[in-house]
Image (cartoon, grey):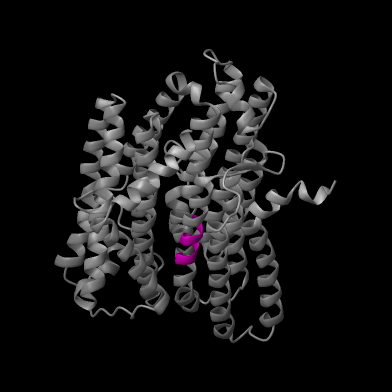
Amino acid sequence: MKFALIFQNDVAAFLPETFLAISILVLLLHGSFLGASAASLYTYLTPSLVRLTSTILFLSIFLVLNNPVEHQTLWNALFVSDYLSTWAKFIILLGLIFCVSICEAYMFSVRFRAFEFFVFLISIGLSLCLLISSYDLLSIYLSMEFLSLIFYVLACWKKNSYFSAEAGLKYFILGSIASIFFLFGASLIYFGLGTTNLGAIALLTEKLTTPSPFILFGLICMISALLFKLGAAPYHMWIADVYEGAPTIVSFIFAVVPKFAVFVVILRLSFTSFWSFFPIFWEDFFCVCGLLSLFIGCFCGLGETKIKRLLAFSSVGHVGFLCLGLSCGNLEGVQGVLFYLLIYMLTSSFLWGYVVYLNLDATRHNSSFTSFTDAIGLVKSNPLLGFGVVLILFSLAGIPPLGGFFAKLNIFVGLVDASFYIVGVFAVLTSVISAFYYIRLIKIFYFEKNKDWFFFAPLSKGASTLLVLTSFALIFFMCTPNFYYLLTHKIGLGLMV
């Protein structure tokens, strides 16, 4: 008997993660050998690191899409390979490529010389791929901690900034408390069921009508920790300060990359392991979190004058819509959540790419934070970019026929199918109110006049690539939306079966 054949499928299915782990060592060696000679001439090192990181991420996407193992548990059921994990990894790695494409000009502007930033980017990809494939509470916790440690470091990356240090410290303290809650909840579930494997938990709870209070309290602790990572209310206290204090490129990563992976974990817990708890627990819990997130994201963003804080509260509101989609408990709700996540990632990538570009000019003028006034004159300076930003803002506000409208419409359809009529009416009202601060930005773009001279630097090649790709993806949706609907429907079916 050849013992090497026992884990043959496991190794084949884990090729993307193995490749990313080896790539981290390659980047470390590359930066270490060239870092000494490029200490003062950092422009020689950063472009090569950008090209190397982009190549690594493209090859990882190729390995993910050509995975020979379609559906199987791996490494003694600690991980799983299925249709949901394949497409979620593809979307996560695509978001990291968007980040790498825009970071070169930003690092040149703010004088980032450390090559470790790109090592952290690949480490984020590795941790998120592990988190998406996790099929055990312990592997979920370890992957989440791996990701959190990287985010703590990136949040306080600007060593000479008091606000960045405050953001990193606040995120570290609150994130550590959230990790404690997750571990405590996992221990309570192990106490009640005797296992931490998601598949075994699904079999044990399949016909469990009256769950133990230990299990319910453990679920509350675990899902609260996951919703903290998303910035959902009432666990949103950190999000505005961290988005504002962290470097803009790091805020881009926080806003765009990890949401899909965390929602995959929540979907596995609620729709696979504890599906029988839906009428007695999940509906009420996700409804409360969704309504609170919509309320806070709607009203707290009305008085903001800083773009990064505004986008932080906007993110809270969008997570509220996603929580309401989860509360439906049907296939339409799951498809609506996945479709919303896909459209939101594309639109927020475009908008945060614009904020990074705007922050370059604010940095040149010694401005600490990007405010609404920094955007005055954009339409006159670059009409095409200004028009694209306006369309993206309309999409986030939910104006038809843009993608954001259909994403919210899917959530509303799921709520109506689940007979949550009052919740749907409240979601529509908060969506209408939150459209005010998007329209206020458009009013500043087109109708405000700047008393001083203004100048916007030309877009870099990477930023132009990001904006063009996301724009084409959204235009492609407007022309043929069936591809996105069928993709999310197939992913949802793979989860529900």
Most foreground residue, 127 or 156: 127
Q: Residue at x 60, y 24 (%)?
A: 203
Task: Measuring from the top left, give residue 99's x and y in whole percent.
Answer: 47, 65
Task: Measuring from the top left, give residue 366's x and y in whole percent.
Answer: 40, 74
Q: Which residue lies furthest to the front in this view?
A: 1
- Magenta part of the chain: 92-98
Q: Is 291 positioned to the left or the right of 27 in the image?
A: left
Q: Is 429 positioned to the left or the right of 324 in the image?
A: left
Q: Residue at x 35, y 64 (%)?
A: 470
Reply above or below: 93 against 358. above
Most foreground residue, 4 or 150: 4
- Type of secondary structure dominating the magenta stretch: helix
Viewer can see residue 112 = no
Most foreground residue, 159 or 383: 383
Reply above or below: 85 against 215. below
Q: Residue furthest left?
A: 447
Viewer can see residue 415 = yes
Q: Which residue is drawn at 49% across and 59% down?
A: 163
Q: Which residue lies furthest to the right in this view?
A: 1
Task: Measuring from the top left, give residue 473's x and y in whole percent.
Answer: 33, 61
Task: Measuring from the top left, give residue 26's x and y in whole percent.
Answer: 68, 71
The quarter of the picture where residue 390 lies is: bottom left
Q: Is 461 positioned to the left or the right of 34 in the image?
A: left
Most foreground residue, 208 or 111: 208
Taking the magenta stretch, the answer to whether it contains residue 329 is: no
Q: Which residue is drawn at 59% across and 49% down?
A: 172
How many numbered circles does the render carry?
0
